[in-house]
């Protein structure tokens, strides 16, 4: 008896005999093709196998089937000979998998500005009309990328709109606004929020189709990944995310930054800095690993390109030491050396270097002339992490210790630069640490995740100072949920 998943031998033989007639092959021609595939049986044995006088090994029977099927493929794919075992299905030509395969393969040799037309083609295979909206670097507006062939529309606010709600929440939502049924799907590259995908459907009933919703999720995830990975090869996608031209210092800093949001199964972090188009001395970095998360926040003295060069050099020194496997203390020393040797006249950089052990919750950190990170627990700030204090980087420091703190599951960390608390309103009042504490407390109580909290915080800081900051302001928020 054949095993489960196998075709009976007699059925294969019958299929071979019938297919030979349709394939217009003689036994000699069949044997020639079979021999070309590596078959070892001679012509007499093949003929005896077909008539049932002898039995060839299954592998030879399958090679005969391949030889006949190849000929049938040349003539017509309507009739096929079964194999003795189930084979993987051929490449799909219709359906969601075919759409994603075509999108990925076409993107391999395409410039960045062709992502949208490729996404449109993939969407049509799914039966939807696609438009791609990316968020600007200030995370205030969703800007539609060109190339979808649909009537033009203007930017959409992240606050107070349905597409903006999808961006903020990371949840798919349907819409019938304007008599146009469509699905709004988050564009997420991992945890990084890129924008939203608009998928216009044929009827209102399609909005509740669970299969279509899932397929649009697949498409949105693929498009988001392509936007992130292909954007570095050109300027077109980046240009649409800018609300105003960038200064050289801002261009330098942004090129050094990692994605603004990252996550593992037990950890989420998000960073943001302002003014986006003119930042100079602020920077942040992080590194996710299976067992640890490293975090860095830096603030170089001064403004403009000089401060940007110093921040970039300090970030590169810390990153280089970390990637060499050196610990917090050695990373701080590496930043010291680079700043002191490269930038004269008592130049310095303040900052925090931290590393969290994800198994135990042990946090080790160094604070170099920088504001103390805040620890939030159960929705409120319970402590300023004031340990690990030393002089700013670049000012000779040999004796300093690495501080430690033990986190509990659900704890938040807030690392920030003094531009956040020192933002002044028209009356000269600072945003201040107390206002920062109150803001974070409300955000955590409202259930806002770190990415959305960082976005709202930087918006509040900007509004406090009338939309124009006099100093760089950066924040890096992290939540450890354990495993």
Image: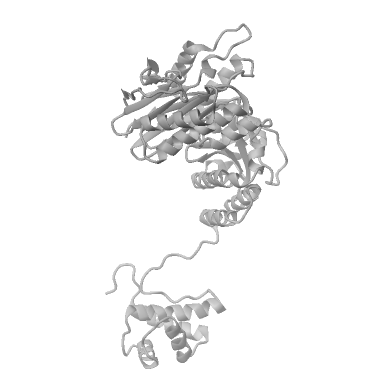
Task: Please tell me whether residue 5 is drawn above or below residue 403 in the rendered image.
Answer: below
* Quadrant in which residue 206 is drawn: top right
* Quadrant in which residue 179 is drawn: top right
Left or right: where 125 falls relative to 87: right
Task: Please tell me whether residue 318 is drawn above or below residue 399 in the rendered image.
Answer: below
What colouring does the structure picture have? one colour
- Which residue in the rendered view is the most extreme toward the bottom? 44
Q: Is residue 449 in sight in this rendering?
A: no
**Residue depicted at 62% across the width and 30% down the height:** 249
Quadrant of the rendering where the N terminus is positioned: bottom left
Q: Is residue 16 in sight in this rendering?
A: yes
- Which residue in the rendered view is the most extreme toward the top? 427
**Residue depicted at 41% across the width and 79% down the height:** 63
Left or right: where 81 falls relative to 195: left
Q: Nearer the viewer, residue 318 or 424?
A: 318
Q: Nearer the viewer, residue 237 or 169?
A: 237
Residue 159: x, y in percent?
Answer: 59, 25
Residue 149: x, y in percent?
Answer: 70, 47
Q: Nearer the viewer, residue 163 or 140?
A: 140
Quadrant of the rendering where the C terminus is positioned: top left
How many labels, in total? 0
Residue 260: x, y in percent?
Answer: 51, 33
**Residue depicted at 56% across the width and 18% down the height:** 460
Q: Nearer the viewer, residue 219 or 271?
A: 271
* Quadrant in which residue 35 is drawn: bottom left
- Which residue in the rendered view is the most extreme toward the left? 1
Residue 25: x, y in percent?
Answer: 50, 87
């Amino acid at each position: 008896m054949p095993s489960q998943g196998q075709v009976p031998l007699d059925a294969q033989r019958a299929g071979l005999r019938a297919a030979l007639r349709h394939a217009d092959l003689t036994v000699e021609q069949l044997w020639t093709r079979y021999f070309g595939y590596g078959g070892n049986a001679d012509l007499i044995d093949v003929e005896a196998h077909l008539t049932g006088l002898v039995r060839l090994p299954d592998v030879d029977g399958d090679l005969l089937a391949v030889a006949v099927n190849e000929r049938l493929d040349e003539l017509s794919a309507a009739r096929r000979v079964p194999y003795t075992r189930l084979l993987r299905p051929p490449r799909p030509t219709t359906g969601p998998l075919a759409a994603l395969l075509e999108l990925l393969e076409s993107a391999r040799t395409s410039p960045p500005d062709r992502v949208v037309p490729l996404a449109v083609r993939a969407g049509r295979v799914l039966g939807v009309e696609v438009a791609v909206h990316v968020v600007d670097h200030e995370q205030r507006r969703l800007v539609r990328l060109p190339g979808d062939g649909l009537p033009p529309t203007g930017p959409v606010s992240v606050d107070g709109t349905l597409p903006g709600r999808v961006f903020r929440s990371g949840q798919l939502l349907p819409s019938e606004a304007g008599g146009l049924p469509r699905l709004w799907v988050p564009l997420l590259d991992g945890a990084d929020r890129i924008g939203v995908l608009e998928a216009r459907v044929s009827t209102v009933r399609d909005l509740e189709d669970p299969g279509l919703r899932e397929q649009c999720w697949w498409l949105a995830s693929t498009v988001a990944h392509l936007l992130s990975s292909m954007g570095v090869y050109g300027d077109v996608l980046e240009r649409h995310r800018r609300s105003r031209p960038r200064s050289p210092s801002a261009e330098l800093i942004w090129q050094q930054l990692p994605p603004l949001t990252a996550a593992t199964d037990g950890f989420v972090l998000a960073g943001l800095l302002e003014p986006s188009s003119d930042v100079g001395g602020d920077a942040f970095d992080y590194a996710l690993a299976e067992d640890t998360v490293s975090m860095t926040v830096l603030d170089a003295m001064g403004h403009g390109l000089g401060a940007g060069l110093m921040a970039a050099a300090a970030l590169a020194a810390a990153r280089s030491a970390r990637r060499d496997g050196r610990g917090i203390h050695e990373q701080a020393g590496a930043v010291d050396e680079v700043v002191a040797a490269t930038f004269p006249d008592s130049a310095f950089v303040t900052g925090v270097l931290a590393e969290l052990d994800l198994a135990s919750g042990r946090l080790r950190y160094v604070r170099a002339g920088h504001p103390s990170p805040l620890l939030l627990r159960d929705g409120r700030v319970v402590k300023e992490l004031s340990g690990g204090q030393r002089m700013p980087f670049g000012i000779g420091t040999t004796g300093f210790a690495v501080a430690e703190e033990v986190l509990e599951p659900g704890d938040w960390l807030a690392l920030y630069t003094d531009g956040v608390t020192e933002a002044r309103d028209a009356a000269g009042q600072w945003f201040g640490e107390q206002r920062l504490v109150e803001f974070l407390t409300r955000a955590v109580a409202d259930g806002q995740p770190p990415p959305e909290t960082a976005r709202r915080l930087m918006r509040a800081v900007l509004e406090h100072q009338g939309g124009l900051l006099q100093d760089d302001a950066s924040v890096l928020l992290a939540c450890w949920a354990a495993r």
